[in-house]
Amino acid sequence: MHRNLRLFYILLFVTAVAILVREYGNNAKSEMDNVEASAFAIADTSAVNKIFIADKDGKQALLERVSGQRYWSLNGKYFARKDAVDLLLKTFKRVKVQSPVAHAKLETVNRMLAGRAKKVEIYQGKESPEKVWYIGTSDQSHTGTYMLLGDAIGNVAEEPFVTHMEGFTGFLSTRFFTDEREWRYTGVFDYPGRSLGGIHVQHHESGLDYTMRVDSIGNLTFTGLKPRTNASIDTVQMQDHFNRFRKVHLETYNNHLSDLALDSIMQVPAAFTLSTWNADSTITSNIELLWKQPTMDTYDNDGNLNPWDGARMYARFKGEIVLVQTFVFDPLLRDSF
């Protein structure tokens, strides 16, 4: 009897241990799965060297860090906007899980992610991505974004989460766009430090034409335009005007024109031409500005109807029609000093 009782206690102990091991193992696995499924953030964004974004409409954006270059490359053809790339890197580092998806919404969110999610592959120097994000729409409060985590071999987590960034109110999906025109670097003139060597401004309708250049000893010289009075040119104003050309951006490559309108505008004579070059003329750039029909009636200070759009102009830049803001370019077109 004692022998049977001892055996009973041994079996009871073994059974209890087995139950504890099983329960602990399941809980640990569940917790680990949860940690992995919610581990969206990238701790070291300086190691991110490639980002690939694709949507369900077939549009794609491939962003790659290029050694020695100030800007990332876009689809192997263009420079990418630095502000937009920096925003992605900031998002990778600071994203956090706000909450799990409510059970009642889980089926709807999963269906949305399957049908409309953007896929984002994040690389850190390897052939395969470090993480894969599937980014959906915002939640009902527009303060969170539905996201699902995947890995390099196509596995995805069992559940999505609502994510956000601390210190930011809004949703994250709009940062991950795929339109190549919106990703392209918008710099027209880009001369950091003291690298700008000269500028040439042409007002084609009035015939006004002038050049500013830095001479061999660093002095700014001026030719072409005559002051409106007999007084000498204000050198401070001249230097300020010259410096405005160091960094100038267009607004967008998305000109919203039909092919027919595009062909027509390509033939329109330029109203202004702006040209720049560096000290040894190895880096040059020029842009032609064209008047744009107004989208609404506006009036000048005398109450006269403006014949042209007061906010934007078309421009020919590197063989393309782009949009520029008059707020940016008007100061570059001054005709007196």
Image (spheres, helix red, strand yellow):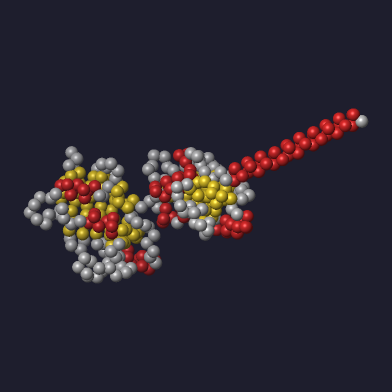
* Image quarter of residue 292: bottom left
Side of 331 relative to 108 (left or right): left
Q: What residue sits 43% from the left and 55% below the top?
A: 180
Foreground of the two, 47 or 262:
47
Foreground of the two, 78 or 335:
335
Side of 29 relative to 298 (left or right): right
Residue 144 in the image: x percent, y percent?
A: 51, 53
From this viewpoint, is residue 191 visible? yes
Q: Residue furthest left?
A: 230
Side of 145 relative to 154 (left or right): left
Residue 11 in the image: x percent, y percent?
A: 83, 34
The N terminus - image quarter: top right
Q: What residue sits 57% from the left and 45% below the top?
A: 38
Q: What residue sits 44% from the left and 43% below the top?
A: 65
Eyeballing the image, is 236 above or below 301? above
Q: What residue sits 29% from the left and 48% below the top?
A: 247
From this viewpoint, is residue 56 visible? no
* Image quarter of residue 327: bottom left
